[in-house]
Image (spheres, helix red, strand yellow):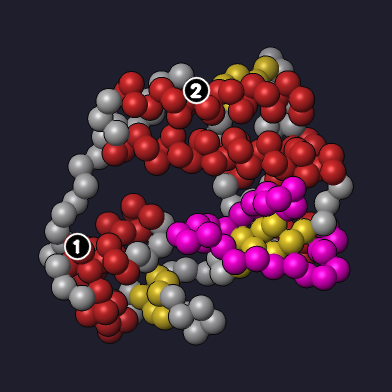
Amino acid sequence: LYAERAGVKADSAIETREIAPGDNRLGFRVVDGRLFECDGEKLVAIDVPATKLARIEGLVGIRDAARALVEAQPITESDADLVPLRERLNSLYDAFSKQFGCISGKANRAAFRQDADWPMLLSLEDVDEEKGTVEKADLFTRRTVGVTARLERADSAAEALLVVLAESGSIDEGRLGELLDRPSVEGLQELGEVGAGFRVPATGRWGTAGAD
């Protein structure tokens, strides 16, 4: 966790909370004015100074807004439907940068670089070190990804695995079964037999053979 890697003091009571349904992505959350980190199974409280908390909370907002816009693009045909998401991203970024400077600034980097989506946040800025300028990336002004047709059927578990990994970055058992048009457990067993997937003992979830 962040506290262990960055030397930040974890809450002495080690407060934990359940994650919201479907929200098991790794990274920071700010809940009821407290900083937590999601480890995939639960939220773990982290004790940070108020000034750092405000900085992290702002970056969390930008991260979530950028993620929402990025994920909406491949499934949204009308550019007009993306406007509210883009406006929110711009609004959050403008407010944050006015108070804390650019995302790639030293203090922001130190506060947020352990978040799983830190590379995505850095990609939101075009930094010219020679000129000393920082500008918003294209995502703030235009569509950067075209509409992608959703695949409805896969001929094998291996093919279905590639699809679900591309769509969600992890093994979505329900989507796997949908693509194969048969119980997901059969597809998972097939993946296990060829060594393409395995059940993680600690979590009971399925992972890919190449996962850390």
**Is residue 23 found left or right of 182 in the rendered image?**
right
Does the magenta portion include 9? yes
Q: Which residue is mark 2?
A: 87
At 34% from the left and 26% from the top, the residue drawn is 81
Q: Main secondary structure of the magenta part?
A: loop
Locate the N terminus and report the quarter of the image it occupies: bottom right
Residue placed under numbered mark 1 in the picture: 179
- Location of residue 168 by image quarter: bottom left
User: In the rendered view, would you say 8 is above or below 99?
Assistant: below
Tell me the quarter of the picture where residue 145 sits: top left
**Which residue type does callout 1 highlight?**
Leu
Vertically, is 47 above or below 108?
Answer: below
The residue positioned 20% from the left and 42% from the top of the image is 149
Spatial separation of the CA atoms under disc 1 and disc 2: 35 Å
Seen at 63% across and 42% down, the residue is 60
SS category of the residue bearing label 2: helix
**Is residue 121 placed above or below 191 in the rendered structure?**
above
* Position of residue 24 measured from the top left corner of the image (x, y, whole percent): 52, 61
Task: Where is residue 92? Give x, y as percent.
Answer: 61, 28
Q: Earlier in the sequence, mark 1 or mark 2?
A: 2
Asked if residue 18 lies in the magenta stretch, the reply is yes
Residue type at tag 2 = Glu
Q: Position of residue 35 (x, y in %)?
A: 73, 53
How many C-alpha atoms fall within 10 Å of the one at disc 2: few (<14), some, or many (≥20)?
some
Q: Which stretch did the figure color magenta?
A: 7-35
Q: Nearer the viewer, mark 1 or mark 2?
A: 2
User: In this rendering, does residue 138 appear at all?
Assistant: no
- Whether residue 54 is visible: yes
Residue at 81% over, 63% down: 10
Q: Is residue 36 left or right of residue 47?
A: left
Q: Residue placed farthest to the front in the image?
A: 32
